[in-house]
Image (spheres, rainbow, N blue to C red):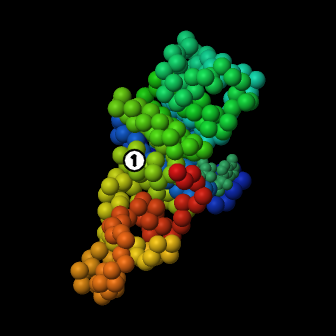
Amino acid sequence: MIEVKNLTFTYPGNEEPVLKGLDFAIPRGTIFGFLGPSGAGKSTTQKILMGLLRGYGGQVSYEGKELNPKEEGFYSRLGVAFDVPRFYGKMTGRENLRFFASLYGERTPPVDELLEAVELTEGADRKVQAYSKGMVIRLNLCRALMHDPPILFLDEPTSGLDPGLARKVRELIAEQRTRGKTIFLTTHSMETADELCDSVAFLAKGKIALCDAPVNIRNRNREKDVVLTWGKEGSYQEEALPLKGIHKNPRFLSLMEGGDVRSLHSRETTLEDMFIALTGQSLGEGERL
Ligand SMILES: Nc1ncnc2c1ncn2[C@@H]1O[C@H](COP(=O)(O)OP(=O)(O)OP(=O)(O)O)[C@@H](O)[C@H]1O
Ligand SMILES: [Mg+2]
């Protein structure tokens, strides 16, 4: 559906390029997660794919045709939730949605089901200036989905939401995939990426360090650890030992013989571990649920 080849971009007036040659493809009906620390170029890439930033190098194609935002109906095929949502504060949530639907030149789409899915039914008739951050994020998602577009660009769709609402939003996004939508998702959240994405790309310093399915990344040539908790109540300690050869690891055997071991479990490599191992960078302070 979307194919990107050797994408480069430098903001006007800057010397250092933000993107230094990205390659990836997003098949139809899949969720592509774009991960990277703050300032890596995630939103920049998203804006190029949406035709909002010109002057890029390389190729961006939709269904084999070079990106052309002037093509008729281009924007009505996209659903977009920007990282910094803008709404009219003096209008209610529902009025805002109606207004934005009119910009797409569409009749007002049915939004009640969407509002209910993100628990905004009650809030919909309140003025947006009185919304909490999480309500704005959810209204933003409704705006992206309401005209039922085949391609979605979602920038940090679960940031600022409590764990229950973040889960609802993830379910809503997963449901969009089952309906055949192609989704480009930008996130700092490993949970969101791991649970939702068919493939993820790690962006660091303007390049893609790795692009693969989360399950493949987690199991990539990293050895698992066994985490032991031991000690007396109130002063427990934890220690990780490599799973490989654990049956003859002297430290493991001595802890087990000590009789104070309270728990024992194997630890999977997380996407974040892999990100740090590959890029030497952490994902930074993003959302943590
Ligand atoms: N309009 C602009 N003009 C000049 N530089 C910009 C502009 N917008 C972004 N940048 C720079 O480009 C780099 C990438 O920014 P971008 O917003 O794409 O990062 P991001 O990965 O989306 O970060 P975050 O996780 O914080 O949203 C940053 O160094 C940023 O300062
Ligand atoms: Mg961003």
Residue at mark 1: 195
| Near-viewer residue (67 or 237) | 237
Against 34, residue 142 (above or below) is above
10 Å neighbourhood of mark 1: few (<14), some, or many (≥20)? few
Report the residue at 51% width, 15% height from top.
Answer: 110
| Near-viewer residue (227 or 93) | 227
Q: Quadrant of residue 18 in the image?
A: bottom right
Against 175, residue 284 (above or below) is below
Against 41, residue 76 (above or below) is above
Q: Is residue 152 left or right of residue 10?
A: left
Q: Is residue 100 left or right of residue 74?
A: right
Q: Is residue 103 visible?
A: no
Q: Which residue sits furthest right?
A: 90
Against 235, residue 34 (above or below) is above
Q: Is residue 92 left or right of residue 277?
A: right
Residue type pointed to by label 1: Glu
Q: Quadrant of residue 177 in the image?
A: top left
The percent coordinates of residue 261 (x first, y second) are 36, 75
The percent coordinates of residue 152 (x first, y second) are 48, 34
| Near-viewer residue (115 or 89) | 115
